[in-house]
Amino acid sequence: MMALKAYAVLEKDEYTGDIYFAPRAIVAAKAGANEYGDGELSYIQCRRAPWADAFAGKGVPAKVAADHGWHFECHGCGIQIDSDLEEEHRLPVDGIVGTMHGAVYCCARCKWKHIKREARRKQEEAAAIEDFKAIVRARFPDADFADDESEFRGHHAYVTRADRSGFWHRGQVIVAFRFPGMKIGPAHFRVESCHRIGPPIAGYTCCNGDREAFEAYAGATRARH
Ligand SMILES: [Zn+2]
């Protein structure tokens, strides 16, 4: 097998791009053009990047790439990561975590904080969904919650935390449930509170083709109370 060589392929307008490993420049250029230049070879530049050859099949460490002029946005705190990291943020370039094709962090501590924050956010999202299921259950006691649906048709929660506060704002919560006579997809109970002041906007929605069935179900459920 021919050894793969590293090529830096950059789109010429904004100089965004990637390192590609290929046996020949044209192969790397075509791959890069497809990704960054609408398939047009004239929109990109492709140069050999021998410093990255050793990382074929392994992923290029972001700290090595930073040393060769590449820059990234920290996945944890959002600062620009490049060879000036030490000067600008007092963080050693050698401490940059991650590879070019994955999440890159300015330092190990930032990655750890990000992972903890994400785990907490997931917990808060799950708690929000459980709370809103209880609201739905109060209205539709036999609601069949669509726990197995994709994220597009199923439950969804968007929560944010104000800096340094323990308070999580529930920006949007959607709970999905099935009902007798449903043909197209689950109905949703949806709460949006984009503003922190004022009442949230809440309501039930269903797919167009299921309107009659849902209204009949809502009417029948209400009658029982
Ligand atoms: Zn960071």
Image: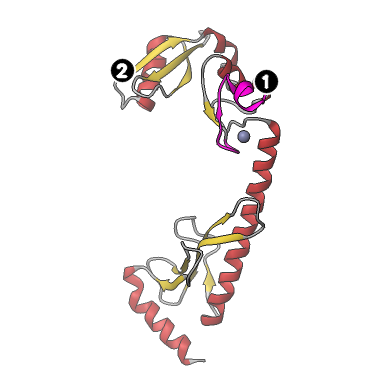
**Magenta residues, start to end:** 75-92
Residue type at tag 1: Asp
Please state if 47 lies on the left or on the right of 110 as rendered: left
Please say whether residue 57 is visible from this viewpoint. no
Image location of residue 107, percent across then percent down = 67, 30
Please tell me whether residue 76 belongs to the stretch shown in magenta.
yes
Image location of residue 27, percent across then percent down = 40, 15
- Residue to which mark 1 is pinned: 94
Q: Please rate how many residues cluster around mark 2, counting C-alpha atoms within 10 Å: few if below 14, some from 14 to 19, many from 20.
A: some
Q: Magenta segment, principal secondary structure?
A: loop
- Residue to which mark 2 is pinned: 41
- Pick whichever, 160 or 225, lies toward us: 160
Q: Residue at x 64, y 26 (%)?
A: 96
- Pick whichever, 65 or 24, lies toward us: 65
Counting residues from the start of the chain, the first of labels 1 and 2 encountered is 2
- Pick whichever, 171 or 99, lies toward us: 171
Residue type at tag 2: Leu
- Colouring: secondary structure
Q: Which quadrant of the render holds ligand 1?
A: top right
Image location of residue 69, percent across then percent down = 52, 16
Residue at mark 1 to residue at mark 2: CA–CA distance? 34 Å
Q: Residue at x 45, y 72 (%)?
A: 202
Quadrant position of residue 31? top left
- Pick whichever, 5 or 60, lies toward us: 60
Please say whether residue 91 is visible from this viewpoint. yes
Q: Residue at x 67, y 20 (%)?
A: 94
Single out the mark in the foreground, 1 or 2. 1
